[in-house]
Amino acid sequence: MYLRTIYELEEEGVVPLRARIAERLGQSGPTVSQTVARMERDGLVVVAGDRHLELTDEGRGRAVSVMRKHRLAERLLIDVIGLEWELVHAEACRWEHVMSEDVERKLVRLLDKPTVSPYGNPIPGLDELEREDHGPSAASSVPPTLEVGLQRLDELARRGGGRVEVRRIAEHVQNDADLMAELKLAGIVPGNSVEVGSIPRFGDPVPVTSADDEKATVAPLVAHAVLVRAQ
């Protein structure tokens, strides 16, 4: 859980601090500090001089493996089984712990080599899955980075808004099925185009109009977790 959370923070461009982990997981500061200390002893993380957390090669390898299983499961659940988009994430959280690499390889072929999850997030570690030695590739040995040109929905609205393509929805908001259903209803699904209104200041709800002319407002914290590209 902690390794995956650190990976998610990196993926979102958020500095992985113990305080951020406590916020994401709803745990106390002392609990997080004790767990991080144990992970450090186990060689999974190191605490940098500025107190941010860095995954070791071993820690990153484990995080990539879990995230790959999770996102392949998401693709299977939505592309083959037909589970509702807003329910896929929670179900995949169960599958990620029981999936073998043999099953992963079968899924990659079955799903025609997918590269992103149903929420637009990259599926990491696909190269390692095909390597016979299972060693980490150079690409997986570095932290994930945001795709060039992506903006957070609230930041774009603060700059005046405009028409955008929805690209990614951060992992931490996917846990709320009701919220995800609202986003789907508003057209905020990766690949869709929406019109974003302007907001006078950060912290205001973001007005959005879908291609079907459905109007909605997105809560500030949620808008910060939606990544878009201007059109």
Image (tube, rainbow, N blue to C red):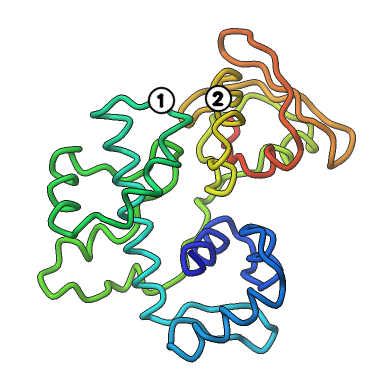
Label 2–label 1 contact, CB within 8 A:
yes
Image location (x, y in percent) of residue 178? 59, 28
Look at 32% across and 57% down and name the residue there: 97
Task: Name which residue lies at 43% across and 88% down.
Answer: 43
> Three-letter amino acid code at disc 1?
Glu
Q: Is residue 210 above or below residue 3?
A: above
Name above or below for residue 143 compared with residue 43: above
Q: Residue furthest right?
A: 200
The residue shown at (14%, 67%) is: 131
In this picture, residue 4 sits left or right of residue 160: left
Q: Nearer the viewer, residue 43 or 122?
A: 43
| Element at label 1 | loop
For label 2, the SS is: helix
Give above or below for 125 relative to 141: above
Q: Which residue is mark 1?
A: 84
User: What type is the residue that disc 2 sits on?
Assistant: Ala
Quarter of image, res 13: bottom right
Of 128 and 197, nearer the camera is: 128
Q: Is residue 197 toward the left or the right of residue 128 in the image?
A: right
Q: Earlier in the sequence, mark 2 or mark 1?
A: 1
Whole-percent x and y of residue 159?
78, 37
Please name whichever residue, 67 or 120, is drawn nearer the observer in this view of the structure.
67
Mark identifier at residue 181: 2
Please provide percent x and percent y for residue 78.
Answer: 33, 30
Q: Quadrant of the C terminus?
A: top right
Residue at image position (57%, 49%) is 172
Q: CA distance from mark 2 to mark 1?
A: 9 Å
